Amino acid sequence: MLRYTINRVLLTIPTLLGVAVLVFFMLRIVPGDIVEVKLRGDGGAVTQETIEMERHRLGLDKPLMVQFKDWMVGVVTFNYGISMWTERPVMEEIAIRLELSLEVAILATLVAIMLAIPLGTTAALYRDTWIDYLMRIVTIGGISIPSFWFGMLIMLGLLAAFNWLPPITFTPIYVDPVANLTQLIWPALAVGYRYCAVTARMIRSSLLEVLSEDYIRTARAKGVQEKLVISRHALRNALLPAITVIALEFTFLIGGLVVTEQVFNLNGIGQLFVQSVSRNDFTLIQGMVMLIAAFYVFVNLAVDLLYAVFDPRIRYT
Amino acid sequence: MTIAVSDTSAVETRSRPRGPIAEFVRQQPLGTVSFFIICAMMFAGVASEVVSPYDPLAIDFVSILGPPSWTHWCGTDAYGRDICSRLIYGSRTALVIGFTSSFLGSSIGAVLGIASAYFGGRIDNWIQRVMDVLLAFPIIVLALVVVAALGKILVAGIDINLILAIAIPIVPRVARVVRAAALSVRVMPYVDAARAAGYSHARIIFRHMAPNVVAPYLIMLTAFIAQAILAEASLSFLGLGVQEPTAAWGLMLSGNASDFYRQAPWMILFPGVAISLAVFAFNLFGDSLRDFLDPRFKV
């Protein structure tokens, strides 16, 4: 187990370094940088001299390899530099928005799991009946309806029913839990629908697989109540593969948040990312990409290690 | 395999053997419905000029923010443009970008996946590490990074870099699945036979292995058309995809659409329905295709 853990942890390093190299060179393939957007974006007449000065100030005139060296040193020492637009440290820009996005993500996860387990289980138990078909339509709807449009529909509904508009400022949960939850539950629902759909589908298929196992027949044969067979014997084993999906989808929530935060006017990680992309803010894009990738890689690592803990067959191969 | 399926059904239902299409219709009613939705969308996209009642770009200040009516079925937007016509032209944008980027991404992914399985060893290892790096991003995040990196190149009103931005995140996802399928083909005697006969690597990959992983490839291709349409809509919604005045569903939801929640909810309603229906149809069709072609195959 120790050897497996060490191996698995070491494997994350090449992936993260790869991400760092990839994002650096991708952003610099095509000429054109933030200075153009910053100074000429509004059509203002700016001399070439001013542009060169600004480039020099931001360090964009250094040779590519020097910039690359600086970036890689920064990655290893957790110093991601200063945003080229706001002039504040990248880590600080991210940190002040992380709380909001993380809370939406966690709320979405809770909602999704609480709905997905009963939905997936019912679909599996009533396989090939109209309940199963209905569930199939609902779950495929979940992966088809864009989360940002679903968010807009929720807003439209809230506006019609309660004349409610999303507040402009964010209230942290420790200041006013009610205000906080009434603000964040809606975006959480919007991004959570897809999450719930994917998880429910996974639970349905893994439960169907488990239900055909010998030990389920044994349990039924020895007279265990059907309710207990499902909850104790089948569901527990079926949830293991579902954990993978739950964990991986959690990292992909950030993708949904990128678009949905825009709808609800939330100043979170997603909105910051969209802003930095439209401003060509290289340092901020690089920092956020590293954060998102690191998040994915470590959640993946945690899932693999947890799997090895729960399922001894993996440890010994 | 199709023959075997229709044979057993002939025994069960005691009817004459059916062709693969009739068999698909019988086994996958939802898939058939979704196929007709896709056909209708393709027709709207190809024959936009004929089908649409108005010019999608015609500004009409007399009928700004008009509700759905007999003259404007889906209402009009903030410039008085007919929403129904814009939806019809938008299906062209969605399909062109959806098809090309999914085709591009899936094909490159498939070739990489087969090559990875065929060569094995160090090449396999390198390709897989690069795919791991690309997999560390959600589709929309990687697409945004590519958009930031490449900017825009317009060819005939379509942004080539937007297609590339959506295709790149598809590559590693297809490569991984196709590689798994190709690994089982790799050990088949006919691949060894082809190598013994002295065929080139390219010939073995394209002529001997590729035809045998067509099922997963087609399934992934269809499923990723749905993802690509969704990604295009999201990027356009964020203002980083298709640009005004081109008609695109995601774009119709962005900008001033959200300023008119109260006065003109139809501006939000119809484009969203169009996106959802299109993505739904391709997802369902891909799902049914999977059940039909290869019931054991899981994505």
Image (spheres, helix red, strand yellow):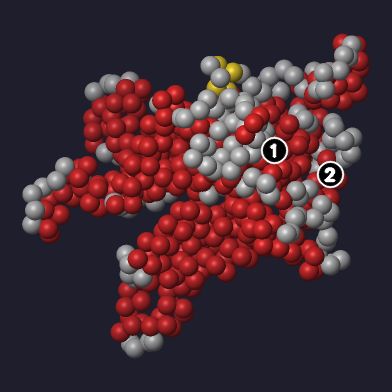
At numbered mark 1, what does the secondary structure look like: helix, strand or loop? helix
Work out whether residue B252 can be spotted: no
| In the foreground, B46 or B21 | B46
Kind of residue indicated by mark 2: Glu
Identify the mark at residue A93; answer none if there is no mark.
2
Q: Residues within 10 Å of mark 1 (few under 14, many from 20)?
A: few
The chain carrying label 2 is A
- Determine the CA span between mark 2 and mark 1: 28 Å
Q: How many marks?
A: 2
Disc number lying in front (2 or 1): 1
At numbered mark 2, what does the secondary structure look like: helix, strand or loop? helix
Work out whether residue A228 can be spotted: yes
Residue drawn where x is 45% and y is 37% of the image: B225
The chain carrying label 1 is B
Side of A120 relative to A88 (left or right): left
Question: Where does residue A90 sit, x and y in percent of width and height?
Answer: 83, 40
Q: Residues within 10 Å of mark 2 (few under 14, many from 20)?
A: many
Residue drawn where x is 71% and y is 63% of the image: A162
Residue annotated with mark 1: B256
Question: Where does residue A39 sit, x and y in percent of width and height?
Answer: 86, 21
Side of B45 relative to A59 (left or right): left
| In the foreground, A231 or B280 | B280
Residue drawn where x is 32% and y is 78% of the image: A217
Quarter of the N terminus of chain B within the rendering: top left
Up the image or down, B31 lies above or below A315; here it is: above
Question: Where does residue A129 sit, x and y in percent of width and height?
Answer: 33, 67
| In the foreground, A59 or A163 | A163
Residue A65 position by quadrant: top right
Question: Where does residue A276 sit, x and y in percent of width and height?
Answer: 76, 35
Residue B169 position by quadrant: top right
